[in-house]
Image (tube, rainbow, N blue to C red):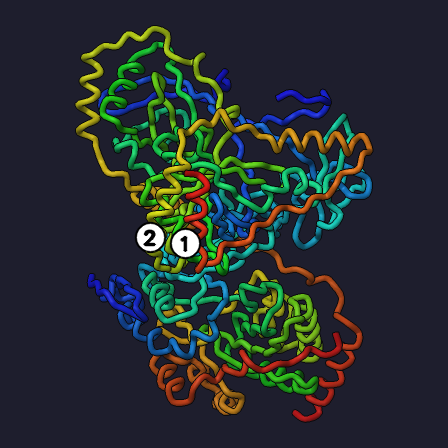
Amino acid sequence: MSRKVVEIAGKRLSLSNLEKDLYPSYGFTKARILEYYRRIAKFILPHLKNRALTLKRYPEGVEEDFFFEKRCPPHRPEWAKTAEIRRDDGERMTVCLVNNLETLIWVENLASLELHVPLARASSPETPDFMVFDLDPGERANILDCASVALILRDLLSGLGLKGHLKTSGKKGLHMYVPLNRKDTTFEDTKKFSKAVAGIMQKNYPDLVTARMAKEYRKSKVFINWAQNDSSKTMVCVYSLRAQEKPVVSFPLSWKELERLAGKGDPGRLRILHSEALRRAEDGGDLFREVLVKKQKLPHL
Amino acid sequence: MAGGTIWKGHIHFGGANVPVKLHTAVREERIQFHLLHRRDHAKLRQQMICAYEKKLVPIEAQAKGLEVEEGKYIIVDPEELERTAPEGTRVIEVHEFVKAEEIDPIFLDRVYYLEPDAPAKGYNELVGALREIGVDGICTWTMRKRSYLGALETDGKILRLNTLRYADEVISVKSLELQKIPVSEKELKIGSDLINQLTGPFQPEQFENEHQKKLRHLIEKKARGEEIAILRPRRLKPTESDKLLQTLEASLKKVA
Amino acid sequence: MKSHNPNLSASKSSSGREPEMIPQGIWSGTISFSLVAIPVQLVKAVDPGRVSFRMLHRDDYSPLQRRMFCPEEERIVAPDEIVKGYEIGPGKYIVMTDEELESVTPERSRTIEIIEFIDMKDVDPIYYEHPYYLVPLKGGEKAYRLLVEVLHRTNKAGLAKFVLAEREYLVAVESREGALALITLHYSEEILPDQDILPKGGKIETEEKSRMKNVIKKMMADFRPEKYADERREKILGLLKKKIKEKALVEAPEIGEEQGEGPADLIAALEESMRKVKKNR
């Protein structure tokens, strides 16, 4: 298995197992994974910046066991930036902050195919920068049902003056992010708000939507997981790969595109592969940028 | 007197088996404070509560979980994970020997005295052997359901076991991101002279925990209802970088 | 140690307990030697690497939190209701504020004054308690670098005392890989004597000792702490993998499912918006 030493911004990194195929039924080696992340870096880094990283490592590939790590691996390079955070049970923990390309590549060399981050930054863990609606289809529902729900949700929130942005989860669902970016908004606010929204959605579209987690309520519906609005929860970062059979990406979709694709009736059109993700990002820029900069206030709280 | 026997085992390496008893070597003297309820001075107890219902949870209903996926846990017995040797072997297995001075003090954790256990065999010989070559033995053992890494050392005529920290527990200096600031050779020379002037033997017996005595007096004073003067902590003015050399020279003059 | 008040006793803790550790970044002040003063902050040098666990409720796997409980009022108390008290008699406490504690030895509450230098070789490892690093604060970078360099050159360590809240520490300040490390030391009165466990009779079988020396020489190695860390980690991860295959994963329940809809204003606004949405579809 091949090794290589690279230098990024003056820092030396030893890359390993470059020939290892981590997506065996598709054929995608570690070298190609590193290449994907190198090219997507300028789009993904602003969304990872200063957020406590949760690594999901697949050293033997997507078909084998994965390691879930919230603590920053102790054998980290001296230049890897970290933060000290306090868990909600009071325990302290050192976490990685992926603030630059060299740290991103180091993390990917550890086969952390998926990058998950909290909704708040490490320096202010109780104040989320956005509110999320995690749309998760039940067994008998699919991403097209999520698309329908997302469109209703968009209009519902628009009536309250709020704008949202959509991305694919990379698996079966969709994620809607409502940018807030205000110092005084807390998880208590976003949780209360999103719960109320989920409740109204369920009340008005009971055959399509559920706000309850228990599996028996979810079978043919779309579950609006409002409880993701919590300091202890993470979401897969936009532009991250997913450890699915194929290297799909959690990719942003414009509303126009969603309307068009949802109408076509083919769930496959909503799965964005690594190559398409790179092409679209390089051509069109960061479609999710507004999520980081737009300021909105939650009304009626 | 050394602390009571807390564990018994035997040191093993290359055919040698030396039975020993472990004693604590350090007893910390400390004025203990209690956390109290401001209103009624009731002594507070630490309890576990359910994060959601905010209700108390008794010990029998508590379990330790390891997060293996977001929000998903596997219930584990942490001691089970820490154990490397089967329970009850009582062996302090020595894996290798290293020069005593190679052990960076940052790895040293806790010290235990080892007393020869009956039948006393090999103890004095081991002390002599280790001392004459100038080495410590790196060993592992399982005690009270936890596994330990340690250094077997000599101290005069007795053996000691010094538990060691693991490398992944020590934070590297490089992560502190210290700047490399040039210091002049003159400043280094005067600084070194100053240090040499102020060097003396390590005589720990000279140091007393005066603060503890004073604290006790203060507490008693308050108990008698007397006023306590609030004294502001002394804060020194930092030495400016461009005044460093002259400050060093003035210091040297003072002590020479 | 004698006390004027027989009721005020020092609590003896056996070294089987975790030492009280100074939390990250809580102490900042100056370190001085002779006339030189350097502004610094104290930070951790050790981060317990053990795999971290969460306390869960055995029945429904909801996460648990540590709280302080008042047995008189039978309720959990908030942090601002908590004070530090010293027991002077059964059930009788004297409350001390942080300011009063700092007044005990004010000259050492914010200053680490190095009064002399020693050879680290002279320090018996039994004295080491807990290591920290000192990092320079703004303006002190040059003087900090000087101290690190001269300690390294002369191969010495600084000996000082410093106070944090109600505890006074005897410390050694040394140069380590280009940084200042501060290691708290035990006071000599805390080191228990070992005379009573000395082997009776100093008889040594020289042949046995020679045999041991031969074995020792064959087992010589370099001190490589990473090697031991890796071995332990591999073992733990292997055990975990096995466990994950055998056992079922449990999931913590979601909160607030049973609570009300939400603030009335918000519900009203949402319902109004929903009416419009439905009309337009």
Per the image, label 1 sits on a secondary structure element best described as helix
Q: Is residue C222 above or below residue C40?
A: above
Camera-side residue of B245 and B214? B245
The chain to which mark 2 is attached is B
Per the image, label 2 sits on a secondary structure element best described as helix
Question: Label 1 is placed on what type of residue?
Answer: Leu
Horizontal placement of C181 versus B222: left or right?
left
Camera-side residue of C167 and A135? C167
Q: Are marks 1 and 2 on the same chain?
A: yes
The answer to which quarter of the image holds residue A152 is: bottom right
At 41% from the left and 34% from the top, the residue drawn is: B147
Q: Is residue A210 above or below residue C197?
A: below
Q: Quadrant of the C terminus of chain C?
A: bottom right
Instruction: Give coordinates of residue B94: x percent, y percent.
Output: 29, 29
Instruction: Give coordinates of residue B228: x percent, y percent.
Output: 76, 38
At 66% from the left and 71% from the top, the residue drawn is: A185
For mark 2, does the 10 Å Cα neighbourhood hold few (<14), some (14 to 19), or many (20 or more) residues?
few
Q: Which residue is mark 1?
A: B245
Q: Which residue is mark 2?
A: B186
Question: Label 2 is placed on what type of residue?
Answer: Lys
Q: How many marks?
A: 2
Q: Quadrant of the N terminus of chain C?
A: top right
- The reply to whether discs 1 and 2 touch (Cβ–Cβ < 8 Å) is yes
- Rounded to the nearest whole Å, what is the CA distance between mark 1 and mark 2? 8 Å
Horizontal placement of A194 versus A44: left or right?
right
Q: Is residue C237 above or below residue C2?
A: below
